[in-house]
Image (tube, rainbow, N blue to C red):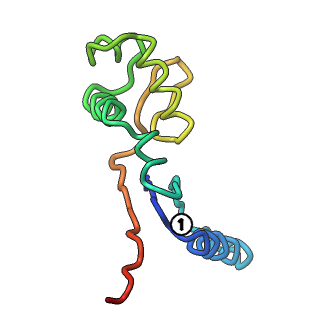
Amino acid sequence: MRVRVGEDVHANLARARAAMTALQQGKRPKPHFAVGFAEVGQMLAVFTPKRWELIAKLREIGPVTTAQLARALERDYRNVHADVAALSEWLAVQREEDGRVSVPWAEIIVDMKLPHQLAA
């Protein structure tokens, strides 16, 4: 999964256009799993340090219930539940049919575009 920060909307449109062209040609487009944020503050509001810890712990222990995850993290259940819900909205965590939660990614790559530098 990729987390993109500050990427120009035209880059996303180009990826979508390439996928549509491939489909029209009868080809299967390469899967692309990414979420985007306009600025770093937005990304950091979703992917907080505690949530990165949650993601790492889930990768370490595998699918578990939210209660089991809260115990493994030594955190309050309600806070872990809220973090799981937020991360699920951004596709970083998924809830299995049996109610357990997991991280479906082997890696999460964060791409951050820096502002253009003005000439001196």
**Is 64 situated left or right of 35 in this image?**
left
Residue at image location 31% in from the left, 89% down from the top:
120
- Residue 67 location (% of width, % of height): 40, 10
Residue at image location 61% in from the left, 68% down from the top:
28
**Is 13 situated left or right of 75 in this image?**
right
- Residue 3 location (% of width, % of height): 44, 54
- Residue 38 location (% of width, % of height): 53, 58
- Residue 42 location (% of width, % of height): 48, 47
Observer-nearest of 69 and 26: 69
Q: Is residue 64 above or below residue 109?
A: above
Residue at image location 52% in from the left, 53% down from the top:
35
Residue at the far right: name it.
24
The residue indicated by pointer 1 is 30
Query: In the image, what residue type sits under mark 1?
Result: Lys
Residue at the far bottom: name it.
119
Number of marks in picture: 1
Residue at the far front: name it.
120
Residue at image location 37% in from the left, 37% down from the top:
48
The image quadrant of residue 103 is top left
The image quadrant of residue 109 is bottom left
